[in-house]
Image (tube, rainbow, N blue to C red):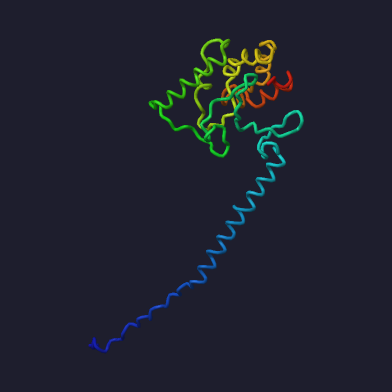
Amino acid sequence: MRNIATADRVAVPEPMEIARPSLFADLGTVVRAATVTLVLTGLAYPLLMTGVAQIVFPRRANGSLIADDTGKIVGSELLAQGFSGPAYFHPRPSAAGDKGYDPVASGGSNLGPTSKKLRDQATAQLEALTKENPEASGPPPVELITASGSGLDPHLSPAAALWQVRRIARARGIQATRIQALVEDFTEGRDLGIIGEPRVNVLDLNLALDSRFGAAPR
């Protein structure tokens, strides 16, 4: 009988050494990944999109700027401007910046519907509109009383533009029907026929007033 003590012993393999990654190797991988990502997403992609935009729709890519009859840039069709003269269409009120219509301070008043300050502002705006437009038919559209969320909405509904026609016609000494026809000419339809609402660009409309009927008397 074989003695257990003298039995063949099973050879136990020695533990394998696990290679530990070098700190510098990991750092090099991170740097390469960050560099490739930066080049692709921070340089190549923006340059490609900028180039495509300049070729396909350069005017919009450069800010949709608008020039007057002399070629002077007077604004952008994307940003509202403040017009207060009686011979021009007035845009929506603006809470952007201290005096409104500030393109670097886009935003609303953030006043809630229960705010007394908001009610006072709306009341004052309604009184001013009624005084400036005594011949207008009916109450003013609400968009002429309240500011937009951005404070820089460049459009009005056709109804809000038509509501101001008689004041402009009186200030310019021309027939109201001619101003009304101008609004109809500059009314933009829904995008793709279904998106949004009909609208008019206030800056385009005011430039057209001066172009067709001459500069407004001061």
Looking at the picture, how far across and down is residue 100, in whole percent?
54, 32
Quarter of the view holding residue 59: top right
- Side of 77 relative to 4 (left or right): right
Find the residue positioned furthest to the front. Answer: 218
- Side of 131 relative to 75 (left or right): left
Compared to residue 2, the image places residue 179 above or below, namely above
Looking at the picture, how far across and down is residue 2, in whole percent?
24, 88
Residue at 43% x, 26% y is 118
Compared to residue 9, the image places residue 54 above or below, namely above
Can you say which quadrant of the picture contains the C terminus? Answer: top right
Can you say which quadrant of the picture contains the N terminus? Answer: bottom left
Q: Nearer the viewer, residue 156 or 5?
A: 156
Image label count:
0
Find the residue positioned furthest to the right. Answer: 70
Looking at the picture, how far across and down is residue 21, in whole percent?
47, 72
Residue at 64% x, 52% y is 44
- Side of 107 relative to 63 (left or right): left
Q: Nearer the viewer, residue 208 or 20?
A: 208
- Side of 13 relative to 25 (left or right): left
Q: Nearer the viewer, residue 24 or 184?
A: 184
Looking at the picture, how far across and down is residue 134, in whole percent?
56, 11
Quarter of the view holding residue 33: bottom right
